Amino acid sequence: MPNGSYSYIGREAMLIPTNATTMNLGWLTSASASEARRVILHEFGHALGFIHEHSSPTANIPYDREKVYAYYAQAPNSWDRATVDRNIFLKYSVAETNYSTYDRSSIMHYVVPPELTTNGVGVPFNTELSTIDKQ
């Protein structure tokens, strides 16, 4: 099975050939039960149409960009700056998504270590659906 976990977002999966994978939970055999549950909830959120919470038009995370680039350049991600831009900094416009108020407790939020923000406030690994996720 391929490495990593991913899912196409909502109806995007309908554009994928029927013999192709639209969701992958490739590395969960070595994960704890809590981590597996977190990842499964997150990926099924994508399948239902949820975007990453940090990409919401209402998210205003005060990232220290240079620290974020350095963090994601390390293993296991090994992302270049363009990949960080696309996966971390890119935000959806108001016109292209249905969105709620910003929800730092959402299962769809990436972890944000506090040292990657200019105000020292991070976002932990969220392991449960938030109240807003359930609405």
Image (spheres, rainbow, N blue to C red):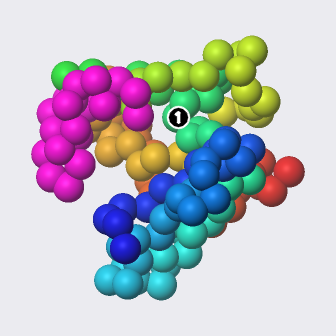
Q: Is residue 79 left or right of residue 37?
A: left
Q: Rate crowding at label 1 as few (under 14), some (14 to 19) or many (20 or more) other CA atoms within 10 Å.
A: many
Magenta-drawn stretch contains 78: yes
- Up the image or down, 38 lies above or below 84; here it is below
Badge 1 element: helix
Name the one closer to the observer, 42 or 82.
Answer: 82
- Measuring 66% from the left and 33% from the top, which residue is drawn there? 102
Q: Is residue 32 left or right of residue 6?
A: left
Residue kind at label 1, given as amino acid type:
His
Magenta residues, dominant SS class: helix
Answer whether residue 56 is visible to the viewer in this image: yes
In magenta, the rendered stretch is 67-87
Work out which quarter of the rendered image holds the N terminus and state it: bottom left
Q: Which residue is mark 1?
A: 54
In percent of width and height, residue 13 lies at 66, 49
- Measuring 53% from the left and 59% from the top, which residue is drawn there? 20
